[in-house]
Image: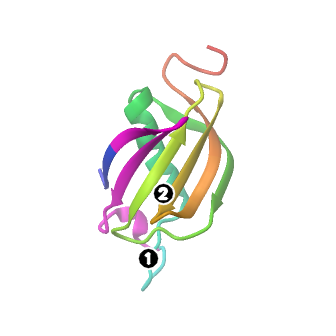
């Protein structure tokens, strides 16, 4: 895995992880020559990995209702990733920060094997 995560810890209704983004992660390739940044799909990959650590390995993001990237994640960055999880099929939220500054945030719905929509 291209991430090293510590956590989660409780931050009110949120769960939070400290994540180090591996500078050798293939997701940086081609985005962009000379100044690599993690593309938005990489932000969602990080969220999915942490979701799976809580909801089980079959948990996946099935819909992204909102995604806003405000700052790039550079190779080797240490970020805080926070999740506020609803049940399967319900709206959940995420926020990523680096040194207290917002990096990205959004909302998504997820499912897990045997847990879809109104289950």
Q: Residue furthest bottom?
A: 34
Disc 1 target residue: 36
Q: Would you place residue 60 above or below residue 102 in this image?
A: above
| Structural crowding at the residue carrying mark 1, measured as other residues with C-alpha within 10 Å and reported as few (<14), some (14–19) or many (≥20) | some
Residue 77 on image: x %, y %: 37, 67
Residue at image location 31% in from the left, 63% down from the top:
22
Which residue is drawn at the image coordinates 41% and 31% (left, top)? 54
Q: Disc 2 designates what residue?
A: 42
Q: Residue 74's spot in the image, x, y percent?
A: 42, 72
State the image coordinates of residue 92 (x, y, percent, origin top left): 61, 36
Q: Secondary structure at mark 2?
A: helix
Residue at screen point 46% across, 37% down: 51
Tell me which residue sits at (43%, 76%) in the image: 36
In the rendering, at what x and y percent does residue 109 appear? 62, 35
In the rendered image of this protein, does residue 109 appear above or below residue 28?
above
Residue contact between numbered discs 2 and 1, judged by CB atoms under 8 Å: no
For the C terminus, give its image quadrant.
top right
- Judge left or right: residue 86 versus residue 114: right
Q: Nearer the viewer, residue 80 or 72?
A: 80
- Please report the bounds of the magenta region as a residue range: 7-30
The answer to whether 104 appears left or right of 47 in the picture is right
Whichever of labels 2 and 1 marks the residue nearer the N terminus, that label is 1
Asked which quadrant contains residue 27, the reply is: bottom left
Instruction: Compare residues 10 and 54 and report the one nearer the observer.
Output: 10
As drawn, which residue projects farthest toward the front? Answer: 12
- Of residues 110 and 80, the one nearer the viewer is 80
Residues packed near mark 2 inside 10 Å, few (<14), some (14 to 19) or many (20 plus) = some
């Amino acid at each position: 895995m291209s991430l090293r995560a510590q956590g989660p810890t409780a931050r009110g209704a949120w769960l939070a992880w400290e994540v180090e983004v591996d500078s050798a992660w293939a997701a940086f390739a081609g985005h962009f020559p000379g100044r690599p940044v993690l593309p938005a799909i990489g932000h969602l990959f990080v969220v999915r990995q942490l979701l799976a650590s809580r909801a089980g390995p079959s948990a996946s993001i099935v819909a992204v209702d909102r995604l806003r990237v405000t700052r790039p994640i550079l190779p080797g960055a240490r970020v805080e990733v926070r999740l506020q999880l609803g049940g399967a099929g319900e709206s959940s939220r995420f926020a990523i920060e680096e040194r207290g500054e917002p990096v990205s945030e959004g909302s998504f719905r997820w499912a897990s094997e045997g847990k879809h929509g109104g289950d």
